[in-house]
Amino acid sequence: MDALRISRRQSIAGLSVAGLAGLLIPPALAQQKRETTGVGIGKKGAAIDDEDIFTFALNLEYMEAEFYLRATTGKGISDTDAGMDAGRVVGGHEAQFKEKAIREFIEETAENELAHVRFYRKTLGRSSISRPAIDFDAGFKAAAQAAGLPADFDPFADDMSVLLGGMLFEDVGVTAYAGAAPLLKKKEFVEAAAGILAVEAYHMGMARSQLYMMGEKAWDAANAISDARDKIDGTPEKEDEGIRVDGKANFVPSTPDAIAFTRTPQEVLRIVYLTEKAGVSKGGFYPNGMNGELKTT
């Protein structure tokens, strides 16, 4: 296909799949991605490396692990897994699950996210960051406001609430991994990112399908979260879809070619900081910002 006939977003999405398959992204296009989005630019204008991208992912995995562990056990990750200079985590409590199957789904998800934290910490070694400060209370309050949900929305309340809270993270995680994959250089890092993306997509499919079966209240809330994410990420392109589209179930948000949507780190940061502004380095779920080079919208 003539590259001039497809949009930049479509080209990057296609290259995400190529990257996940272990193929090489053309150097010129990788440079264009860095120049047009800011991805690939670190301190003093230096190109970011694979470790910077994995560090960015570890920030997100810390938040996911904390969310699911608190929902299933009432406690977060251990001091050993959080690192020497771990930030404080505010909010969260054990949920009152009604369905045994959903509790088991969330327990498995919590185990997966904790395993991801440990994998990144082991892979990054001495350069591994500690857990940043995380504020679930302020983050979900702002997220609920952005999505038009009740001001007292508690993502740790029950089955539906936990799934909605998880959907906020999982959909964003999938688009983040899909967007970052072409920027990775080391084959082993690409393979790891592909495997973790697949696990996050399993989580996302579980949450979206379970929410759909809960009926109209869940449809409306999930679609409101999707719309809010699409608005706040700072781009005019469609990068999100709700769980009900055109009167039918939609548990696979994707392009017309059935390719996962992609987001740059800056677009992801706008969502987790809950701001549409550029140049912001903290807020929302991360009151002191993320740790590492990639921390500014």
Image (cartoon, rainbow, N blue to C red):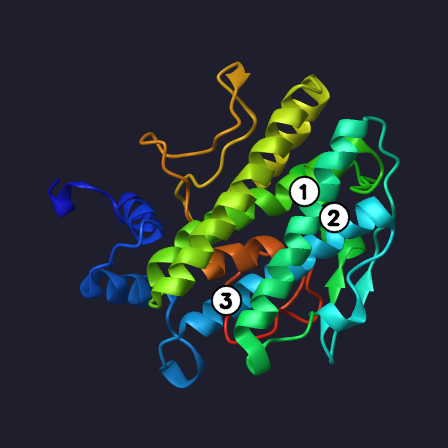
Q: Is residue 283 left or right of residue 171?
A: right
Q: Is residue 280 visible?
A: no
Q: Is residue 4 left or right of residue 251?
A: left
Residues at marks 2 and 3, CA–CA distance in whole angstroms = 21 Å
Q: Nearer the viewer, residue 15 or 145?
A: 15
Identify the element where label 1 is drawn: helix
Q: Looking at numbered disc 2 in the image, what kind of residue is underneath it?
A: Tyr
Task: From the top left corner, tell me how far across and down residue 202 is, in percent.
Answer: 55, 38
Task: From the top left corner, tell me how far across and down residue 270 is, in percent.
Answer: 55, 57
Q: Which residue is mark 2?
A: 68
Task: From the top left corner, tell me how far across and down residue 255 is, in percent.
Answer: 37, 34
Crowding around mark 3 (Cα neighbors within 10 Å: few <14, some 14 to 19, many 20+) is many
Residue located at (42% from left, 50% from top): 178
Q: Earlier in the sequence, mark 2 or mark 3?
A: 3
Identify the element where label 2 is drawn: helix
Q: Is residue 17 left or right of residue 108?
A: left
Q: Looking at numbered disc 3 in the image, what kind of residue is underneath it?
A: Phe
Q: Which residue is mark 3?
A: 54
User: Are circles 1 and 2 on residues that touch, CB within 8 Å?
Assistant: yes
Q: Looking at numbered disc 1 in the image, what kind of residue is underneath it?
A: Gly
Q: Is residue 111 visible?
A: yes
